[in-house]
Image (tube, grey):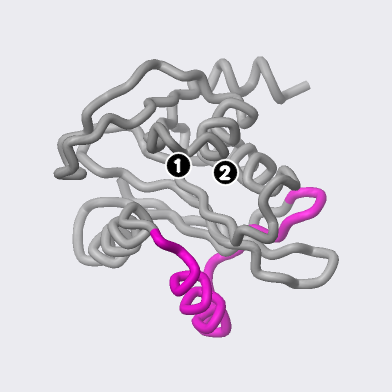
């Protein structure tokens, strides 16, 4: 799937935009504070997607009120004909304010209306309680635990899913 993504999506509080060169220092700072193999793996997938058929849509999250860089979110395909997976990372000082939920709902809106996706998935480490709460509050349903082949880790992840119809039933007027 070849995707042309908008340069900017907006919510009431957030500017969800493509990365620019000015984001470099924010990303480097963010990576220093993140102790996550999952983040490093995602970053490699995003970089590798530029030379492959895999699609990666990644946006910087900017707080409208003051221009602060909060983190990033997006969608990625890991295997051909598989649903896109959503991801989100916020700097810890911005946790608990609903920014991840707000950004994911906007990403879902874009994915279902413009990309014409039927469903989006998320795989979350079992110990990441904040992560699975964000998925649930964004409208995703917990479908069970799965052992993911592509991670090469012998660890189960929580599997979440949202269908287009469920999204529209929950969030569209």
Q: What kind of element bears circle 1? A: strand
Q: Residue at x 28, y 57 (%)?
A: 41
Left or right: residue 71 versus residue 68 is left
**In this orientation, which residue lies closer to the viewer: 147 or 24?**
147
* Residue 15 forms part of the magenta stretch: yes
Left or right: residue 112 versus residue 51 is right
**Given this view, does label 1 or label 2 mark the residue nearer the observer?**
1
Query: Which quadrant of the structure image shows residue 60?
Result: bottom right
Query: Which quadrant of the structure image shows residue 118?
Result: top left
Q: Residue at x 47, y 78 (%)?
A: 28
User: Where residue 78 sits in the image (x, y, percent)?
Assistant: 26, 43
**Bounds of the magenta segment:** 11-35
Q: Quadrant of the N terminus?
A: top left
**In this orientation, which residue lies closer to the viewer: 20 or 132?**
132
Q: Is residue 7 visible?
A: no
User: Where residue 164 sits in the image (x, y, percent)?
Assistant: 52, 23
**In this orientation, which residue lies closer to the viewer: 126 or 138?**
126
Q: Is residue 173 visible?
A: yes
For disc 2, the marked residue is 107
User: Where residue 17 sits in the image (x, y, percent)?
Assistant: 60, 63
In the rendered image, the vertical position of residue 130 relative to residue 66, given as above or below: above
Q: Residues within 10 Å of mark 2 (few under 14, many from 20)?
A: many
Q: Which is nearer the N-term, disc 1 or disc 2?
A: 1
For disc 1, the marked residue is 86
């Amino acid at each position: 799937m070849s995707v042309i993504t908008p340069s900017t999506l907006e919510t009431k509080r957030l500017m969800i935009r493509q990365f620019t060169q000015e984001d470099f220092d924010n990303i480097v700072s963010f990576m220093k504070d993140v102790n996550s193999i999952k983040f490093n793996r995602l970053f490699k997938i995003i970089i590798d997607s530029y030379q492959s058929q895999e699609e990666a849509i990644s946006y910087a999250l900017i707080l409208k009120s003051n221009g602060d860089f909060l983190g990033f979110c997006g969608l990625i395909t890991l295997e051909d004909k598989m649903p896109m997976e959503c991801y989100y990372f916020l700097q810890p000082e911005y946790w608990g304010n609903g920014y991840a939920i707000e950004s994911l709902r906007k990403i879902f809106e874009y994915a279902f209306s413009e990309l014409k996706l039927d469903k989006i998935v998320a795989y979350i480490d079992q110990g990441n309680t904040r992560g699975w709460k964000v998925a649930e509050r964004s409208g995703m349903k917990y479908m069970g635990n799965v052992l993911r082949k592509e991670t090469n880790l012998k660890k189960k992840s929580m599997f979440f899913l949202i269908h287009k119809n469920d999204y529209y039933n929950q969030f569209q007027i």
